Amino acid sequence: MRLVLDTCVIYPTVMREMLLGAARLGHFEPIWSPRILEEWARAAIKLGPMGEAQARSEIALLRAAWPKAERTAQPGIEARLWLPDAADIHVLATAVSASADAIVTMNAKDFPRHLLAEEGLERHDPDGLLHRFWLQDPDGMAALGKDVLETANRLAGDGWEMRPLLKKARLPRLAKALKDM
C-alpha cells in the first residue's frame, strides 16, 4: 500500500515516528513531496529560532532513510485538480503522480472522500490507520510503541506513559490499544 503523508501527520514528531515505524514494519510505503517537507520546516519556525533548523536536519535524515519516498507531481496535474483548500492541491497531485492508494491526513474537510475517489484514492486518518495496523500486527506495533515511548522519555526526561503520550499525539485509539505498556 502506497500512502502519501500530509504535512500535518509528519509534523508532530510522535505521530511521524509511529507512522514511519509502521512503514519500517512493512505496513505501507511512505510518499511525500519536497513541498510537503518544506511545509514541515516552515511550520517548525513557531517552535522558536532553532525549530526550523531542527526540522531541516530531521528532513535530511528522513530523505536519507527513505530515498524513494520523495516524489514530485507531474507537470500540469495540479491544474486539473480541485480541493476545498487550494493550498492542498499539491498533496493530491503528488498522490496522483505517485499512483498512491491513499492520503494520510488529519484534515478530513480539505480532502473530501468523493473528490479523492474520482482519482482512485482513499483518505486515512493516522489514528485509524495505525489502529488497523495494530489489529494486523499487535506485537510489531506494541514494540514500535515501546521504542517511541523510550525515545520520548530519553529526549524529554522520564515521565511519559504510553497512553498520555499517544493521546497528546492525537492517536487516542492507538493509545487505548497500547495502554498496558
Image: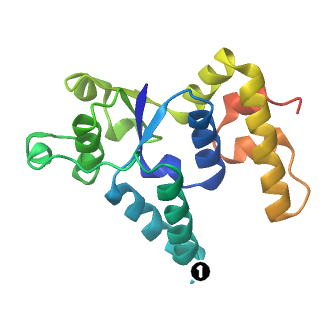
Q: Quadrant of the C terminus?
A: top right
Amino acid type at circle 1 is Met
Task: Say whether residue 145 is left or right of residue 47.
Answer: right
Q: Residue at x 23, y 35 (%)?
A: 96
Task: Say whether residue 126 is left or right of residue 82.
Answer: right
Task: Say whether residue 46 is left or right of residue 14.
Answer: left
> 72 or 157, which is in the foreground?
72
- Relative to 94, residue 61 above or below: below
Task: Say whether residue 10 is left or right of residue 140.
Answer: left
Residue 132, quarter of the rendered image: top right
Residue on which the image places disc 1 = 50
- Relative to 116, residue 90 above or below: below
Local crowd at mark 1 within 10 Å, few (<14), some, or many (≥20)? few
Residue 122 spot, x, y in % from top left? 35, 25
> 46 or 10, which is in the foreground?
10
Mark 1 secondary-structure assignment: loop
